[in-house]
Image: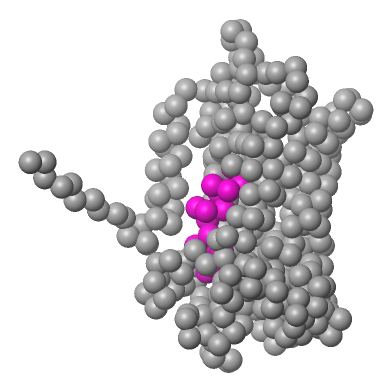
Amino acid sequence: MVKPVKLSFPSLSSLFTVDSVIDFICFYSLTKPVMSNSNSAPTPKQPVSWKRMGQQFASGGSAGLVEICLMHPLDVVKTRFQLQGGANDPTRYNSVGHCFRTMYRTEGFLSFYKGILPPILAETPKRAVKFFCFERYRDLFSAGQQATPAVYALAGLCSGLTEGFVINPFERVKVQLQSERNIKLSEQESTFSKARKIVKNEGLGMQGINRGLTATLGRHGVWNMVYFGFYHSVKAHIPQTDSKAKEFGIKLLMGFTGGTIASTVNIPYDVAKSRIQGPQPVPGQIKYYYAHRTMLLIAREEGFRALFKGLVPKLMRLGPSGAIMMLVYDYLSTYLAKRYP
């Protein structure tokens, strides 16, 4: 009779550490460089011109603007789920559909666009920074040679950390606005007024407008590492095709899959970020601070599954977003390179 095998799983604290990221990078650094579709030996890449850098920056910003205009309502729903407490919360949403219906009935249609101005103001430079920095870090780490999966992952990680520093103050204001229930958008405090109030009452530091910085760095660093690492590693092994429709479908599927996987992996950081940056359970008392401490606290008080609150609306948003962003970036970047060589 075969004896059952006892499985052991790593603790929560070991899943989201710098060591685990380093182990991931080291594992993939053992893989062979990504091969091109031809049999010729890879040649060193030529230095990127300033014009080309500008095209990449503009393409990334455009991709972000398109994505946020289409997908923001799901971001609002995701934040509402992440902010609600346990089963005893009287304002608890039972499902994504229930959240949409309740918000529409009590706050109006425009409530789905609460907090959209900070992302619009930030999303263009944010996505521009994401793609631009990824290209620069990839060139840096590959040292002019063909990139490996480890290079793609490391470049994604570094671009996410850079992006996190840029976006965090906007995220703090956005979460504060999205968390306000039973208030119509027309009656809500303006974005700039909310930002001034936060700075005036709490300051510019880690307890003020930059609260939740570590969680934001973790969220964006992990997401970009998985997203770019997956997309470009898979793309390099896809045979070239003359069919534009097939090429479009392949890129769409790769972007969607990469965005879905990345969103699933990084959501504990996202939940911690929402708790840290949103209203605290007891006004005047800061319960949530530091990303990993917050994750452990949530898991202890509400269970491990609480770290995945808002996963469904997040996947509904960031799965398609991963496809939209990469498609817009790829096609616009290619167009600009051909139109303005």
Residue 98's image quarter?
bottom right
Q: Nearer the viewer, residue 30 or 15?
A: 15
Could you tell me residue 100's position as x and y percent? 69, 71
Q: Which residues are magenta?
A: 258-272
What is the chief secondary structure element of the magenta stretch?
Answer: helix
Q: Nearer the viewer, residue 264 or 334?
A: 264
Residue at x 73%, y 45% (from the top left corner): 325
Q: Is residue 45 above or below residue 137?
A: above
Residue at x 81%, y 30% (from the top left corner): 334
Indicate the quadrant containing the C terminus: top left, top right, bottom left or bottom right.
top right
Could you tell me residue 172's position as x and y percent? 67, 72
Q: Is residue 282 above or below residue 2?
A: below
Q: Is residue 37 above or below residue 295?
A: above
Is residue 69 visible in the rendered image? The answer is yes
Could you tell me residue 152's position as x and y percent? 57, 36
Confirm whether the magenta stretch covers residue 257.
no
Tell whether 254 sits left or right of 247.
left
Q: Is residue 319 above or below residue 175?
A: above
Q: Nearer the viewer, residue 94 or 232?
A: 94
- The scheme the figure's colours follow is one colour
Say how many tags the image has. 0
Spot the residue most to the left. 1
Is residue 277 visible in the rendered image? The answer is no
Could you tell me residue 66's position as x and y percent? 81, 51
Indicate the quadrant containing the N terminus: top left, top right, bottom left or bottom right.
top left
Spot the residue most to the right. 339
Residue at x 80%, y 78% (from the top left corner): 108
Spot the residue most to the top. 40
Residue at x 83%, y 47% (from the top left corner): 62
